């Protein structure tokens, strides 16, 4: 197996046709039989991989390169998700703009070259696979929630998601940050796999357009406080690390079928 095949498998499972902006093959490699897999990869993880006899490293969060600088463009996927939930396109596009601008400014000064350059010097193949894994996880959660009626309780949604091993083992538990576990769910939207959470503006737009229960992977305190003041729905926050590994582990099971052994930096398997 080579790095291109690994990326291709992730895209196929996620249902994506091309490599998104937040994913990249930084250093190509062939004859890959054992990989180190981590959510965040720096020079330390590259050295760990070499010491463990790995043939390549798979990072989840962009480890550098164009994926680190331009990955924020995946945030535009929120538009499609909002439209799927019934939000008018013009409103959806307007809603994403404030945080999209913040993300561009935030990542422009990033040290995008350090880790890929170290990987090249170590001759360690390196791949970043971000939103494909997140989309895999989003689809898994959507499938788990099929059949949940709008008059179900929010706690029923939490219970279904919490059955996955990643969430059972996680130190950070699923939280109902706005609303109540006893509340009726209404329509449910899973707002994941768009680079990062939509913050206040996107959550508010979902609630204003008929969504009763919204799922985020994480949310900043200032966004949560603003949302709590005018929200009319329930916000479930699943937890960042468990949510990431949900999609990553599905990819690793497919790689195993192709003869690739994975060493992970977690026990959330």
Image (cartoon, rainbow, N blue to C red):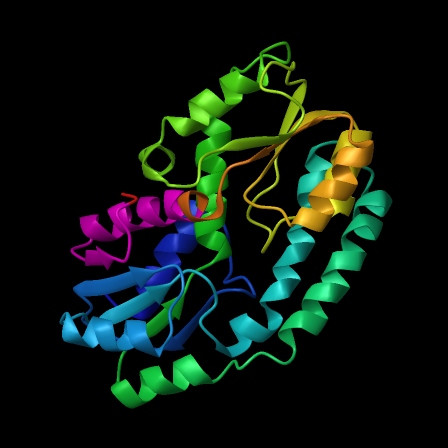
Q: Which span is picked out in magenta?
A: 244-267
Instruction: Determine the residue positioned at 52% across, 80% down.
Output: 112
Quadrant of the image containing the C terminus: top left
Residue 19 image point, x, y percent: 50, 63
Q: Is residue 26 above or below residue 149?
A: below
Residue 202 image point, x, y percent: 74, 44
Instruction: Determine the residue positioned at 30% across, 71% down.
Output: 45
* Residue 209 located left or right of residue 80: right
Count every numbered label the image shows and give the total: 0
Quadrant of the image containing the N terminus: bottom left
* Residue 139 located left or right of residue 256: right
Q: Nearer the viewer, residue 260 or 148?
A: 148
Q: Is residue 226 above or below residue 24?
A: above
Any magenta on residue 14? no
**Residue 262's image quarter?**
bottom left
User: Is residue 15 in view from this perspective?
Assistant: no
Q: Is residue 167 above or below residue 100?
A: above
- Kindly give the residue lying farthest to the bottom in the view shown: 121
């Amino acid at each position: 197996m080579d790095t291109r095949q690994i990326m291709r498998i992730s895209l196929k499972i996620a249902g994506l046709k091309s490599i998104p902006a937040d994913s990249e093959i930084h250093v190509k490699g062939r004859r890959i039989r054992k990989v180190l897999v981590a959510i965040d990869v720096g020079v330390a993880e590259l050295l760990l991989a070499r010491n463990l006899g790995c043939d390549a490293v798979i990072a989840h969060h962009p480890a550098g390169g164009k994926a680190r600088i331009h990955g924020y463009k995946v945030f535009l996927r929120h538009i499609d998700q909002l439209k799927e939930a019934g939000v008018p396109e013009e409103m959806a596009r307007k809603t994403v703009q404030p945080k999209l601008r913040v993300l561009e400014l935030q990542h422009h000064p990033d040290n995008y070259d350090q880790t890929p350059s170290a990987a090249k010097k170590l001759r360690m193949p390196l791949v970043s696979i971000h939103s494909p894994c997140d989309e895999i996880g989003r689809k898994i959660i959507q499938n788990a929630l099929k059949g949940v009626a709008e008059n179900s309780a929010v706690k029923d949604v939490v219970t279904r998601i919490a059955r996955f091993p990643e969430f059972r083992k996680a130190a950070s538990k699923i939280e109902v940050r706005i609303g109540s576990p006893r509340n009726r769910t209404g329509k449910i939207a899973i707002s994941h796999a768009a680079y990062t959470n939509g913050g206040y503006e996107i959550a508010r737009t979902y609630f204003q357009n008929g969504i009763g229960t919204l799922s985020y992977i994480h949310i900043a305190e200032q966004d949560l406080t603003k949302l709590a003041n005018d929200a009319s729905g329930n916000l479930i926050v699943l937890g960042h690390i468990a949510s990431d590994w949900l999609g990553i582990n599905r990819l690793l099971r497919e790689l195993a079928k192709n003869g690739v052994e994975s060493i992970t930096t977690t026990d959330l398997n």
